Amino acid sequence: MSRRQRVLLVVAGALLFLTSFSLLFTFLSTAAVEQGQIVQHLSETRAALERGNAAMEEAIARESAIPRLQERARSLGFVPAREPAGLLLSLPVTLPPEDAGP
């Protein structure tokens, strides 16, 4: 193999290496950009869901307040309960025997 052929072979090898390295770099850069876009989209989606959750929590807190529940109950026809005069029992209470051992 002559010196000229060796130089051409080294130059061709170097060009092949640089081309391969450039293609690999381009592929990895593109993949990184795509992953970044996915992460950005997921972050935006998460922020939107957090805003929606906060709005729902606020609505639940507002609707579950005691005055609001009383107002809704009155609008549905419920009336406030009266205090019971005593506890009514319909059955007699029996206690178990004390010396009933296992």
Image (spheres, rainbow, N blue to C red):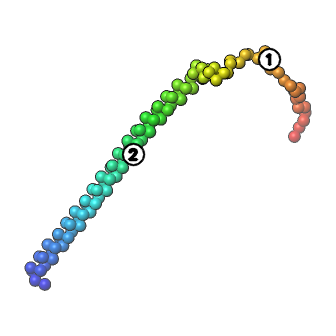
Please give left or right for residue 72 compared with residue 28 in the image: right
Please give left or right for residue 100 compared with residue 84 in the image: right
What residue type is disc 1 on?
Gly
- Could you tell me which quadrant the C terminus lies in? top right
Query: Can I make out residue 42 in this image?
Result: yes
Q: Residue at x 89, y 37 (%)?
A: 101
Q: Quadrant of residue 31?
A: bottom left
Q: Earlier in the sequence, mark 2 or mark 1?
A: 2
Rate crowding at label 1 as few (under 14), some (14 to 19) or many (20 or more) other CA atoms within 10 Å: few
What residue type is disc 2 on?
Leu
SS under mark 1: loop
Query: From what the image shows, is residue 65 above or below residue 41?
Result: above
Q: Residue at x 32, y 53 (%)?
A: 34
Query: From what the image shows, is residue 20 above or below residue 88?
Result: below
Mark 2 touches mark 1? (CB < 8 Å): no
Please give left or right for residue 81 compared with residue 86 in the image: left
x, y (%) of residue 11?
A: 14, 72
Q: Quadrant of residue 94?
A: top right
Q: Furthest-bottom residue in view?
A: 1
Numbered badge on residue 53 = none
Query: Can I make out residue 98 in this image?
Result: no
x, y (%) of residue 99?
A: 90, 33
Given residues 42 and 74, the one toward you in this image is 74
**Circle 2 is placed at which residue position?**
42
**Circle 1 is placed at which residue position?**
86
Q: Quadrant of residue 13?
A: bottom left
Distance from Cα at disc 2 to Cα at disc 1: 60 Å
